[in-house]
Amino acid sequence: MLGPLSDYKGNSILSSAAGFEAKARIGLAAILILGILIGACAPKAQVSLTLGPFVKHGENPILTPPGRGFEAVAVFNPAVIHENGRFYMLYRAEDWEGVSTIGLAESEDGVHFTRRPEPVVFPEHDYEQGGGCEDPRVVKVGDTYYLTYTAYDLKTARLALATSQDLVHWQKHGLVFPERGWTKSGAILSEKVKGKYVMYFGDLDMWIAYSDDLIHWTAREEPVLRPRKGYFDSKLVEPGPPPILTEEGILLIYNGANEKLRYSVGWVLFDKDDPTRVLARAVEPILEPETSWEKFGQVPNVTFAEGLVTKDDTWYLYYGAADMWICLATWRR
């Protein structure tokens, strides 16, 4: 099935294959063949990329709240990394008081996870009190893990950063952009682009920031991605898992919501020589709420991806469902 595609202005390039109903899709296939005109006199640049279909796992949800302790009410929005043959999941957990912490679980097969009995990241500072520590994303550069998360004090949600050598003991480095106020969802590219590290962030529009050391970040003032009227991301766009550097460009899977706050998962491809420049963008999502786990929960109609592992020929996409459960969708290349 050919998945719809758009250029950077949101114009449709390819249409869905005729005869396929939207409700019959399992994660939408995006088989992408796009020609983009770069400027009025510039030559045509060709982008060829295959992504999907992602198939939702038959054992979903793969992690559920136990009804007690720090994760009593909800477990959702996981970050996942694959190290030494094992999957490690950092996930948002919510207790009966509504406070979020970040738990850690591990797995051999990427489906069946064993949880640690206590959270590994929890509120310690004023900017985390009340709401807690939410929505982790993690990358490893060298021997160090870099964790971005949302610190929420019940007034303002702000992007925070921590580092670790073992995924258990974390050193917090404070707010990434203390001067900006409301900021969320930092997705860091683990490889440098023209001598700088790159991070996409935001939850209404999407911005970009640069760093020399992965700790101190400078944000560009203009957004690099905005919502599109009439699409699945008409209300907001928010980075998902850490982006991947491919031959075609920087691939970022992101979360979009429409005017009814229905959250679906899409993708965007940025130029690897200019990470602010959009080469291609999905018209329709690759993942959207379909099952009862995704339609009913603390927040209905939510599929929210934050974890991506590529192992052998399989992509494992981990997502939060209805702000209450953790689910998995896979794609075999």
Image (cartoon, rainbow, N blue to C red):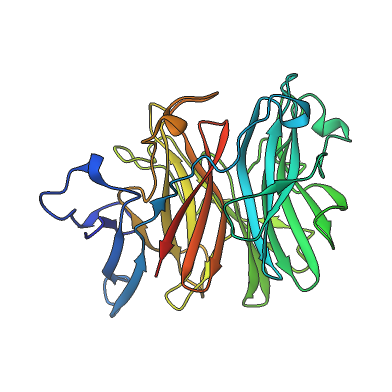
Q: Is residue 74 above or below residue 224?
A: above
In this rendering, position of residue 88 left or right of residue 23 = right
Q: Position of residue 305 (x, y in %)?
A: 52, 47
Provide residue 15's location: percent of width, then percent of height.
18, 55
Q: Residue at x 37, y 37 (%)?
A: 234
The residue nearer to you, when weighing 94 against 251, is 94
Residue 58 locus on image (x, y percent): 43, 46
In the picture as drawn, the residue positioned furthest to the left comes out as 19
Residue nearest the viewer, comparing 270 with 306: 306
Query: Quadrant location of the C terminus?
Result: bottom left
| Camera sees residue 60 | yes
Total number of numbered labels?
0
Q: Is residue 198 above or below residue 41?
A: above
Question: Residue, x 77% and y 74% (percent of image)?
Answer: 142
Question: Does residue 181 appear in the picture of this structure?
Answer: no
The x and y percentages for residue 217 are: 73, 57
Q: Quadrant of the N terminus?
A: bottom left
